[in-house]
Amino acid sequence: MKTADPELMRAMNRLSVLDAIRRHGPISRVEISERTELSTTTVSAITGSLLDDGLILTRHEGDIRNAAARGRPRVMLELNPAAARVVGAKITASRMVFVVTDFCGDVLSTLTLPIRIDRQPISVIADLIEDGVRRCVVDAELSLKDVHSVCLGLPGVIEHRTGRIRFSPILKDTNVDFATEMSARLDTPTIIESDATAITLAHHWFGKARDLEDMVLISLEQTLGLGVLHEGRLFRGAGGLSHNLGDLVLGMGPDGVVRLSSQAGEQAILADQRGDGAFAEAVKLGRGMAHAQALIKAEDSQLLTAAIRAGEAIGLSIANIVTLFAPPRVILVGTSLALGAPFLKSLGQAYALAIPPSLQGVSELVFDDSNDEFWARGAAAVALYELYESPWSTTGPAH
Amino acid sequence: MKTADPELMRAMNRLSVLDAIRRHGPISRVEISERTELSTTTVSAITGSLLDDGLILTRHEGDIRNAAARGRPRVMLELNPAAARVVGAKITASRMVFVVTDFCGDVLSTLTLPIRIDRQPISVIADLIEDGVRRCVVDAELSLKDVHSVCLGLPGVIEHRTGRIRFSPILKDTNVDFATEMSARLDTPTIIESDATAITLAHHWFGKARDLEDMVLISLEQTLGLGVLHEGRLFRGAGGLSHNLGDLVLGMGPDGVVRLSSQAGEQAILADQRGDGAFAEAVKLGRGMAHAQALIKAEDSQLLTAAIRAGEAIGLSIANIVTLFAPPRVILVGTSLALGAPFLKSLGQAYALAIPPSLQGVSELVFDDSNDEFWARGAAAVALYELYESPWSTTGPAH
DNA sequence: CGATTTAATACGCAATCCAAATTAATGTTG
DNA sequence: CAACATTAATTTGGATTGCGTATTAAATCG
């Protein structure tokens, strides 16, 4: 257990105030005090220090006061976008998407590299990522020196705490200390995070879970991922290990263990379509799902069957996740959603069937088709969150 | 987020010190200081207050000093057993086990009621539990007034925070506010907890997870339960909902969803044996597993098949749990372990097969055949933990 | 110009840490 | 054998920092 001292106390309250300002836009000190249940005097002290540090700004104007507004007008406070910049990235097998965001998490520049990097050696991938980060930073008319930290979201089994990639479908190697590698290359602190975890935070900050403290997110991409928000914080397994949903076992088949990834992974759904040359090409370029969507619309029976089977498997797995975490909302994201109505319908039906009676109505399913930039923004949010948490500067209290 | 004030700070450090004393037996102040990373002066202040409140005791004697020990000898501190008493209970379909423990969690008296309470109305069950608690307290030569709180561990889906039983195999009714009911009957604060969660804490405090901060426990009884220890604390689902492993879905069968409980629940394993009159009687009396054990030794093929099938299903499910939580250790407990070698072997094989390669070696399986008293003691530990956490008395700091 | 609401300031309390003093047992020595 | 030195644990005093209540200053509307 962490030892509690005044410093921790201040760090907690600082985070609490900063979070209130981030979430509730321009906000006055009194309102912060109400929301955080901190005394006005404490809020004043903390906001004063935040102002000194340049993390927040005051805004007198634009104060749309109520008609019956009397007395001294409130001074609105908001995050100072210029306080820091971070880079977030989403790395997949067929493309990389980078964003530079300001301190608010608003995007300053975006860069998409449609490069296929299937299981290449680390050095190659690291080269590409380094290049992408540098270019995206330049696009934002910044230098890497202006960037506080970088967060890379990628699929697989990631050990967040150590920055180690235990396994990733995009890497040939396993057990790679990628955080150290990239930090050295970029000369900037670099965080490695599961892509699913990154977009989980994106939804908590900007998307469909802003109102919730508990939530589960299922990402359906090349890899099937899981992100868990528990009591307002990202939940990772013991040792900071991220979850890899595709590794879940559905049962024993004749050829051994049947994993979810073999039933519902992108690969599994599209595998049957190899006969079609154009399709194979599309898959290779990461456009497989778009192509599949067209086939589904044309009622291609082979693909329809695969989609329905996948939906069923995922529906069951979601029910299992809900049995374990009981979140009020489950958000589904990822390219596989493009499979459309048949897929979603079988998913929903399987879920409804599989959810235990005692948990009926506990959780709602929500589908989301955010673009890649949103994922990258989530990675940036992870970097920002660690920034908010850190004590920042000296934060000298009294002057 | 909780607002941090000095009171919270003190509560945290108090818990930290109290926990160090609980875990590391008689311990000197310096050693507490080293372990908790609190300054010696803070430790002295807190231990002083704990001494004033009568929660801990000093022990000068019995201080086995090193040969080269010079200088002032250390004063050893330990929990004061008489500081408080709690009652813990394990409620199953075929019996109830009660314990009264002291402040250390040591058992003062035990009471086992071999009563079958299969799905009786709440009032009947509440009557029996009330009676059991009262008798056990009397056996310890105490009065209910001397008991600080009661914790009941029972199978099913329990909402710890509210004390509500959403579903339990031993109750006919669902969604019962059992905490309120029992608190009123006993006129003592009563906590409702999942039996699996209770024994999880028992293992953390007294058993096979004393050295770990992260751990998962699988309980194989009439109901299949799950307990999770995460970063030294019990992990419960959103809203404090406990997990019910038996509800996990293994796949789609011809008759709909196949749940783990239908493959590996006590009922499922023993169901095939109905033809045997003596066996049915044994099951009804909660001795089914003991009987089954005998049959297995006699190599009854029917039961062997059922046991192997069950082991396989549980092995797969454990792999899934490990995929999600990545605990360094998985502890298996419960009556079904009595099925012996064939069951355990198939379980282990299925687990080894199903664990993802990237997580190989992350987790070790440990089997434990603790008796019912240990479960009840776990429930008592849950009550004690909440007691440790609570600010206790006024805890007046300075005098 | 008074009323009213917000922000900043002054004081007291609690809890941390650091440094110095105190206490207690043990070994050593005249 | 008794007084002194030694060593280590604990307590005490003082400075820092935070929160909270109450008071004072500020800014706008009626």
Image: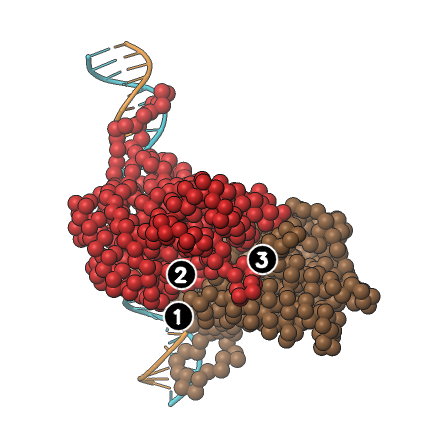
Chain colours: A brown, B red, C orange, D cyan
Are both tags, 1 and 3, on one chain? yes
> Can residue A64 be seen here?
yes
User: Splitting the image into 4 quarters, where does residue A374 fall?
Assistant: bottom right
- Rendered location of residue B324, percent (x, y): 54, 54
The residue at which mark 1 appears reads as A34
Closer to the camera, D15 or A117? A117
The residue at which mark 3 appears reads as A250
Amino acid on which the number 3 mark rests in the picture: Leu
| Residue plotted at (26% across, 48% down) | B112
The residue at which mark 2 appears reads as B157
- Rendered location of residue B117, percent (x, y): 30, 58
Q: Residues within 10 Å of mark 1 (few under 14, many from 20)?
A: few
With respect to residue B397, does A308 lie above or below?
below
Select label 3 or label 2 by which is in front: 3
Q: CA distance from mark 3 to mark 2?
A: 23 Å
Select label 1 or label 3 by which is in front: 3
| Residue plotted at (48% across, 69% down) | A363
**Would residue B68 be found to the left or right of residue A86 on screen?**
left
Tell which subunit mark 3 falls on: A
With respect to residue B361, does A270 lie above or below?
below
> Can residue A329 be seen here?
no
